[in-house]
Image (cartoon, rainbow, N blue to C red):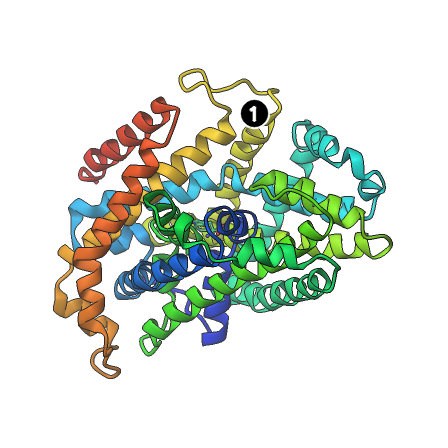
Amino acid sequence: MQGRERGQWASRFGFLMAAAGSAIGLGNIWRFPYLAGENGGSAFILIYIFFVIILGISLMLTEFTIGRRAKSSAVGAYKSVNKSWTFAGFLGVLTAFLIMGYYPVVGGWSLAYIFKSVSGLLSAPDSIGGAFESFAYGTWEPLLFVLLFMAANIVVVVKGVVGGIEKAAKILMPLLFGLLFVLIIKGLTLEGAQAGLDFLFKPNFVDALNGKVVLTAMGQAFLSLSLGMGAMITYGSYLDKDADMPSNAAMVSALDTMVALMAGLAIFPALFAFGFEPKAGPGLVFIVVPTIFANMGVIGPVLSVLFFTALFVAALTSTVSLLEVVSAYLIDEHGVSRQTAVVSLSVVMTIFCAISSLSLGGTVPALPLFNVPMFDFLDLLTDKVFLASGGVLVSVFAGWFIKREDLERELSNDGRKPFALFNVWYFLVKYLIPVFVTVVAISGMMAIKEKSVLIAGIVIILGLGVFSKKL
Ligand code: TRP
């Protein structure tokens, strides 16, 4: 920080909405409900909640603490404690940057589907699958929407922490909750909705209590809460010195979990009522969901607009936090103005997104060295390698490289607000979480079929380690 006034959240509500906005994203809507159904229903949900409490809240609290203590971007936060750790901050910023090279493509799709919901897509229920492929694998249409989606990000982030991110989140997040609520009511009142509730909630501990399911729950908790890449460090750095961080971390995690469950309730009862098969990912939200709406008659297009607006909002508030992570780095570490940082980064990110989008339909060929489309490459690299490594790094850093007294002072607001569970939290962060996250990280990495992507990721992390020491 070179003497410039740093932003600071204007209200607790605003901060909670912004941080929940970062956490609540595609992971809640297109991944969680499906994972729950596939992995033992409410038994999975209980295991998931266990990890949110043990691992998620603690790690989020760790990130808030590191951020507020340093009052700087992820890079500055690590650097201010220990220069050799600067690379971990860089890794976070790089991860955010690369996620912004493909996640907005999906944001663009959801924006497009708001319009498509009322322009004829639903009038031919049988061709919705084909329509999705010819749209997403096409050239100009997805590019146009990615451009619009990125423009929305610029408009929000350029206005800064309070006037942009906080203000947008205060409007958009309640809107998202409201939209999901309407969809839930509609879904639950359909005949045959019970089968969806059974799919989602029927406890099956026999299936759920095995290593793979437990790891899936742990990995999902981690991804869903936007941990491991400096997003919560950056948002935490804008907290004021009296903020109650433990209760904030608990609240954000609770909101994230609530929306994951709401998404399940909005989708599955209706899905089963119409006799469809549950799926995960783009096939669920861009094919199965519109097909359900197409079968609902006149109200279908209206509900479809609500659903894709919800998806758009969820994606936007997440990408806003990613753009902020990278922008904050340029602003805090290099004295770049917010406007220059946000606009120039967005231009580069949009170019990456264009390549990712075109790589899906083969207009841009698969990456030579890795033999996967750019879109998949960035997804694998960030989700499976960088986020997990970032999670291990942040907990080891907090547990072993920041002094216990310093953490305690920061967490208790200089002793003004003692944190009763400090010892428990510290134990978790120092011993348990590094082990947990390492296990998730390694199992995720082993599961990557494209070993060259894994090798590239490891080389990049090692490269950052060597290179950032010289800075
Ligand atoms: N939490 C987001 C989701 O559920 C995905 C995500 C992971 C993310 N890390 C992030 C979003 C960092 C924003 C910032 O979809």
The residue under label 1 is which amino acid type?
Ser
The residue shown at (38%, 57%) is: 47
**Residue at 52% of width from left, 61% of height from top?**
165
In the rendered structure, the answer to whether residue 196 lies left or right of residue 186 reads: left
Query: Nearest the camera: 118 or 239?
Result: 118
Q: Position of residue 316 (x, y in %)?
A: 57, 52
Figure label count:
1
Q: Is residue 124 left or right of residue 177?
A: right
Residue 370, image quadrant: top left
Res. 410 visible in picture: yes
In this rendering, position of residue 30 left or right of residue 337 = right
Mark 1 neighbour class, 10 Å CA radius: few under 14, some 14 to 19, many 20 or more: many
User: Residue 468 in the image: x percent, y percent?
Assistant: 22, 39
**Is 399 on the left-hand or right-hand side of 43?**
left
Indicate the quadrant where residue 211 lies.
Answer: top left
Q: Which residue is mark 1?
A: 359
User: Which residue is drawn at the image coordinates 54% and 30% (left, top)?
Assistant: 356
Q: Is residue 29 above or below residue 173?
A: above
Residue 11 visible at all? no
In percent of width and height, residue 146 lies at 62, 40
Q: Residue furthest bottom?
A: 416
Q: Look at the picture and state if 52 lies above or below 89.
A: below
x, y percent for residue 382: 40, 38
